[in-house]
Amino acid sequence: MASSAAAAAAAASAPTRTEVLALFRSLLRTARRFSDYNIREYAKRRTIDAFRHNQNLSDLSSVSTAYCDGMSQLKIAQRQALVYQLYAPNIKNVMEIKTAPRNH
Amino acid sequence: MALRAALLRHVRVPVRALNLTGRTSEQLLSGFGSLFRSMSSHGDHITREEVIERVLSVVKSFPKVDPSQVSPEVHFQNDLGLDSLDNVEIVMALEEEFKLQIPDLEADRIDSCNLAIEYIYNHPMAG
């Protein structure tokens, strides 16, 4: 009884394909808003790696667990993007400088 | 209101009287074509060739894509063997290239180079 109730609950809360893609897109958009180059690139890389790692999950409970983890990470990232913006340094990171090619 | 009217009167461009000296209307229009929209802010919309070139360069620089297979009609999932996550990544890369914000509904629809080029070319803010 308890396990079937739990299974029904998991089935009810399993995210659809559209929701998963929407979470992926929201995470990437939030990553873009970081002012610091390093954390921005890390957030993008980590999102892509995590979604690839969980790509082939088949049972509903692990899918919904992964989805809930993703949602909480999204909220963390959104708050942190704000905090980073409040204390952003004025100097650009060296990787963001677009230099013209030099002729030696 | 009076100040605004006075300013407008000062700034307003005087209307030129056209000389209809027997030329056809088409010639007149082509002669004055550049003058008609010289004050318009819509004249510098991006050309279709530039859209195609930039879209193809974004798709070619995607690490999982084989650049020799990329053409303006290619489909991301059917021809290039990408999956839906790669699709989202490519649309995000296109957003960054053209400085656009593509809403999720439209972004889900874009799954080939054709659709991407059409959408970006028809977007008024593509830069």
Image (tube, coloured by chain):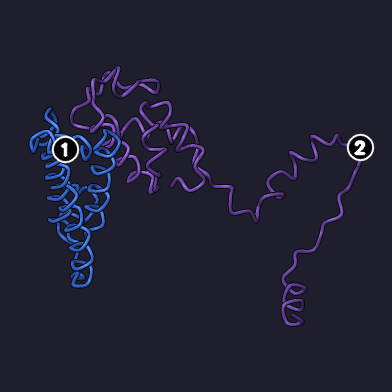
Chain colours: A blue, B purple
Work out which quarter of the rendered image holds the N terminus of chain B and state it: bottom right
Query: Which residue type does callout 1 highlight?
Result: Ala
Place of residue B24 in the rendered image (x, y in percent of width and height, measured from the top left): 86, 34
Extreme residue in the bottom direction: B3
Q: Quadrant of residue A59?
A: top left
Query: Which residue type does callout 2 highlight?
Result: Gly
Q: Is residue B28 left or right of residue A35?
A: right
The residue closer to the viewer here, A51 or A41, is A51
Q: Residues within 10 Å of mark 1 (few under 14, many from 20)?
A: some
- Element carrying mark 1: helix
Query: Which residue occupies 38% across, 49% down?
Result: B99
Label drawn at residue B22: 2
- Dot in front, 1 or 2: 1
Place of residue A76 in the rendered image (x, y in percent of width and height, measured from the top left): 16, 58
Residue that numbered label 1 is attached to = A10
- Relative to A4, residue A95 above or below: below
Query: Which residue occupies 72% across, 77% down?
Result: B4
Q: Is residue B76 left or right of residue A57?
A: right
Q: Tell me if label 1 and label 2 are in contact, CB under 8 Å.
A: no
Query: Which residue occupies 12% across, 33% down?
Result: A4
Label drawn at residue B108: none
The residue closer to the viewer here, A6 or B74, is A6
The residue closer to the viewer here, B98 or B109, is B109
Query: Which residue occupies 22% across, 22% down?
Result: B66
How far apart are the alpha carbons under marks 1 and 2?
81 Å
